[in-house]
Amino acid sequence: MSNAQIPGTAFADAKPHYHILDGLRGVAALSVVCFHVFEAFATSHLDQIINHGYLAVDFFFILSGFVVGYAYDDRWEKMTVLDFIKRRLIRLHPMVVLGAIIGAIMFYTQGCSVWDVSKVSISMLLVATLINALLIPATPGFEIRGVGEMFPLNGPSWSLFFEYIGNLLYAFWLRKLSTKALTVLVVLAAVGLAAFAIVGPYGDLCVGFSITGDNMLGGSLRLLFSFSAGLLLSRVFKPIAVKGTFWVGSLAILVLSAIPRIGGSEYLWMNGLYDTLCVTIVFPALVYLGASETTISQRMTRLFTFLGDLSYPLYMVHYPLIYLYFAWVKNEKLTFEQSLPGALALVVGSVILAYGCLKLYDEPVRRYLTNRLLRVGK
């Protein structure tokens, strides 16, 4: 298969992809954008609309583990750890860099009562851009927006930080585990994740975006369970006869994301239990079912490929627009109804921006790096 024929989700991989999983990834990315839009009107996680949109990250981690295991588990006799790391950097890092640059370009347009960007010097902004582009987390006292994010120019980069950790764990350790040992790890990680969600301080899994004790613990548990569970699924996967999994899976992702907070502030454990069930049972089942259905029309294959290709750029470029929208809402003291035209423009604009970045930057850069850095035949 030539480079021109390889879809963005499969770049530098020779194996065919699971098209429905690509489509579900795109739906999950759109749910994240909507989740972030409503952050401008929330006072806490308790009253956030699209309340559980943060769980899309766990779905992404499971998908990542599944796809990495499927794509690479049988290649290690001919592939070195360095080859694998190059492949993953080529696949992921161009959009990390571009997300940081877009965030920096838009930074001074995003001042509001929650964060004052006017006091940030150009030199501070340049340093912040560099460390974000290199995926080096900013400490809470150093980050320039002042809200405690690891990556204040492009908040969602935090999950890529953990994604990279997951890929390194796979390269050096997880791939070497027997299926039985991997199963034990997944069970133990599930117990740890459940304990954090149910009896932890927040009653949810909306953590990982800051270098604080609870965030680092919660983010690590989210990554360790979901990535390992996806890897385990790729090893034990045996397709079953199913139909309509994209529509069922899409509806499940959207409904589960939109469920209001459960239990309020008095019964945090109830929402933690909900998060745990979604991540440990529902999402792995959706991945399994989505991978099982392979008889798809050409029209739907094109749709799924488009959604899959769009998903990662959309995830990585929409948040600078969210900062701008947030500042506009706060500065003008708008209700959601008043800001609805801006919210719709943000969603549409994010999709257009992501598609432009995919075609004009991400794919060409990855093609160039693939040709320059990977050995022919790998």
Image: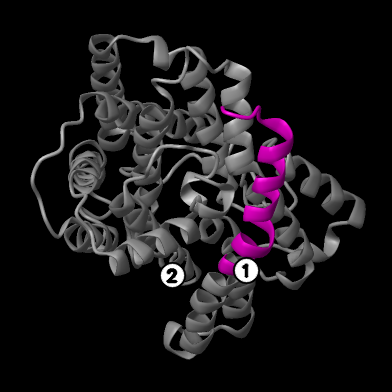
Left or right, 135 with respect to 45, comes to right
Looking at the image, residue 115 sits to the left or right of residue 351; the answer is right
Q: Circle 1 — which element?
A: helix
Magenta stretch contains residue 364: yes
Main secondary-structure element of the magenta-colored stretch: helix
The residue drawn where x is 31% and y is 23% is 189
Task: Name the residue tied to disc 2.
Answer: 38
The residue that appears at 58% across and 42% down in the rendered structure is 91
Q: Residue at horizontal 84%, vertical 57%?
A: 120
Distance (Cα) linking label 2 and label 1: 25 Å
For the residues labelled 2 and 1, say whether their Cβ atoms are less than 8 Å apart.
no
Mark 2, other Cα within 10 Å: few <14 / some 14–19 / many ≥20 = some
Where does residue 331 sit, x and y in percent of width and height? Answer: 64, 79
User: Which numbered tag is attached to residue 321?
Assistant: none
* Amino acid type indicated by mark 2: Phe
Q: Is residue 376 visible?
A: yes
- Name the residue carrying label 1: 356
Is residue 69 left or right of 315 when viewed as pictured?
A: left
Can see residue 44?
no
> Depth check: 222 or 265 in front?
222
User: How many marks on residues?
Assistant: 2
* Amino acid identity at mark 1: Gly
Pick whichever of labels 2 and 1 is earlier in the sequence. Answer: 2
Q: 236 left or right of 50?
A: left
Residue 227's image quarter? top left
Q: Which residues are magenta?
A: 355-378
Q: Nearer the viewer, mark 2 or mark 1?
A: 1
Percent of width and height locating residue 341 = 50, 89
- Is residue 84 located in the magenta-colored stretch of the structure? no
User: What's the image's color scheme?
Assistant: one colour
Which sits in the foreground, 273 or 265?
A: 273
Residue that appears at 56% across and 42% down: 158
